[in-house]
Amino acid sequence: MSVVQGCVLVALWLSPLAAQAERVFVSNEKDNTVSVIDGATLEVVETIKVGRRPRAMAFSSDGSELFVAVGDDEAIDMIDLETLKVVRSQSSGEDPEVIRVDPHRPYVYVSNEDDNIVSVLDYEERTRVTEIPVGIEPEGLGISPDGKWLIATSETSNMAHIIDLNEMEAVYHRLMGARPRHVEFNQEGNEAWVSAEIGATVSIIDMQDTFDVKHTIRFDVPGVPRETVQAVGVALTSDGRYGFVALGPSNRVAMIDQQTYEVLDYILVGQRVWHLALNADESRLYTTNGVSGDVTVIDVDGFEAIRSIPVGRFPWGVIVEP
Amino acid sequence: MIHDRITHGRGGSVQMVDHERQDGRAQNNTGPNSLGSNFQGMSTVKQTAGVLLLGALATLGLASDAGAQQSDQPRDTITVGYLGLERDEEWEPLSVLDPVIDDEGVQGARLAIDDNNAAGQFLGQEFVFVEVIMPREGDVEEGLQELLDQGAEWIVSGLPREGLEALMEIPALEDRVVFNAAAPDNVLRGEACHPNLFHTTPSRRMLADALAQFLGYKQWDRWALVFGNTDEDRLLAEALGEAAQRFGQEVVGEKMWPHDPMSRRAEGGFHAIQREIPVFVQDFADHDVLVIADENDYFGEYFPYQTWLPRPVAGTQGLKATAWHRAHESWGGVQLQRRFEEQADRWMTPRDFAAWLAVRSLGESSARTDSVARDEVLNYMLSDEFELAGYLGLPVSFRTWNHQLRQPILITGPRMVASVSPQEGYLHPRTPLDSLGADEGESQCRF
């Protein structure tokens, strides 16, 4: 990001008009809808009908469309962000769960749980570019900010498969905690955080030299049975200050110092918290709470939950318009 | 030249490996779940295969010789033997809707071998599977010997209690570990426990506790108990009675259903049964639920809708406590169901699941320890670190005091999962999972 661009963005963040324009999208796995929350009023302003079993979402690189993986339709629904309607749908291969968009090429990467592959789709040409074999039940996907690396986690093999996107091939395979779920790169791209649901850990992979795990974060929520602490969604602030990890049925979000990996706090949210998203100026964190069917809004600087917003049934993913 | 740094095990050696000489994909021939099958149109650039052979080579002391990696070196192998027993021809499930299964258990182990190898190929570990299914009157010692001749180092048992107890006594077994994936007998986790015996199938007590917790949650606190006249059913009836007492319920009366196995086609479920059952249960004191103990499935399926009072039927038929069920698809369970069905052309049963858990436990421990050595794998399996993802929402692990796998238990109707025990509110200082089955303080097992 250039300095000028940065300044413009900062100016936008500070402007109240920009805050009002911020929209939060939540996929409701059971309702086959995407709820649209107004970031200013924190109310649901629109509910978009999509295909069956919507889960992960991603924006197209130009920001004009929102992609939604609709697992039971084996497709990616594409929502026009002007009209908030599904304008097209692209076949994705079996049971798409997580999707990521390439920062440079018109590619969307899809984990196909049933086929043990990551599919690479061209969303402009509407073609299937290739398939990358990975471990059993690929789930989490993370892409480095420079678009060089894609990491796919396999839930049953318990591995992170580090894929070189120039070669479209997995080149390193690393053991993670049990049932790895989600991958998030930090802003610099020198670390990837990989959560493990059953292992209740976050493994930090060094993406610069060793491509190996350099640290493992563990969670211990006082007064909560250990088994209910399950690490799922991860969000990292771009300034390198905080990391957030959704801890599933323990109903907590862990707040972590991104530099020391120390857990700073556990914030009580709704039931079975699954995924997380920061808003543009990173003052707020939104969480999807699958069982209670709502979204918790966390004030990042205050370390506290400030609002819960009812959405559809089984909210799964959340993403904030950039 | 690209170098990859591999840390081999905890505190193990660090090997620098030349990627350009390595083509791991040539090694990836581990069956349908193989990770490495070549896809059409894929790039054929062989940059690196990651850690594929490194574990094995490092262990064998060959990693320094990069040239050796080009040939088909044997990997670190771990050979698992399955000892099963042919199905008893005299028993068939009562409902004609239930398939008669001849490969129950062993199919679960086979799938787990493939699952293990999917990760193993990247870790330099290969799981090899050998199996022996004995005839009903077969000799356990011969069966074991056959497995040992094929190199089995770990045994998964599909045997009932008597066979398993005989197996544990055979000197040729030496210190090999046996996973019990079939026998639910409490005594095997108690007085008759053995340091080399692990249980991945729940005990009768765990199943009874799981059901009792759910019935307690429903406040169906008064049970009428009907059990079959087999030894298994008497043991289950006992376990159910104890569970009722433990969780504050009451068995208002119990009766044995006479052993009179009817051909499942001759008695269609209504001919005589429609009149017999109401009469049979009529003299029970008022109760909330009719609980059936019929492990062999020779009469329990007749009971729903035939009761004298309008009461639900639970136990081994009707509302069941079970380790696995086809209707269970939560927590990624659907993936296991689909993989299994693709392999076996039928649904996965609790016994298949127990065998799958046994072999996956081995896979998890050997992957984490980067070892196939018995003691290392075992120590890890019994440590606090061990957590296996068993598609049940919570990690499963072994109890150190009797080597029973602690696991959530499904409470299911015939076509839908009704609940999963432990139920909320049944607390335990260690983990709610330990509210199911014999706890540390009360265990009769002394290793």
Image (cartoon, coloured by chain):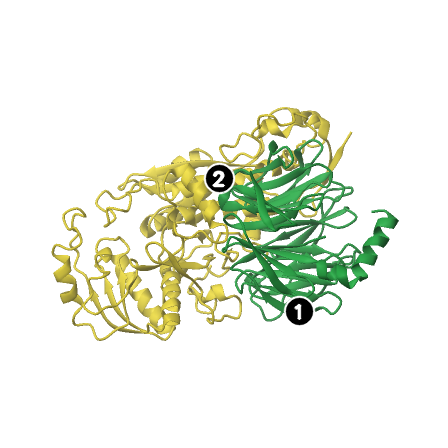
Query: Considering depth in this image, is A61 or B117 the residue closer to the camera?
Result: A61
Q: Disc 1 designates what residue?
A: A305
- From mark 1 to mark 2, how far is it between C-alphas? 45 Å
Q: Disc 2 designates what residue?
A: B113
Label 1: which secondary element: strand
Q: Which mark is residue A166?
A: none
Q: Position of residue B31 (x, y in %)?
A: 49, 32
Which quarter of the figure has residue A228? bottom right
In the displayed structure image, the side of residue A135 where residue B414 appears, left or right? left
Name which residue type carries label 1: Ala
Q: Residues within 10 Å of mark 2 (few under 14, many from 20)?
A: many
Query: Considering depth in this image, is B308 or B203 the residue closer to the camera?
Result: B308
Q: Position of residue B397 (x, y in %)?
A: 51, 56
Name which residue type carries label 2: Ile
Query: Considering depth in this image, is B347 or B196 the residue closer to the camera?
Result: B347
Q: Name the residue located 54 percent from the left edge and 43 percent from the top edge.
A: A137
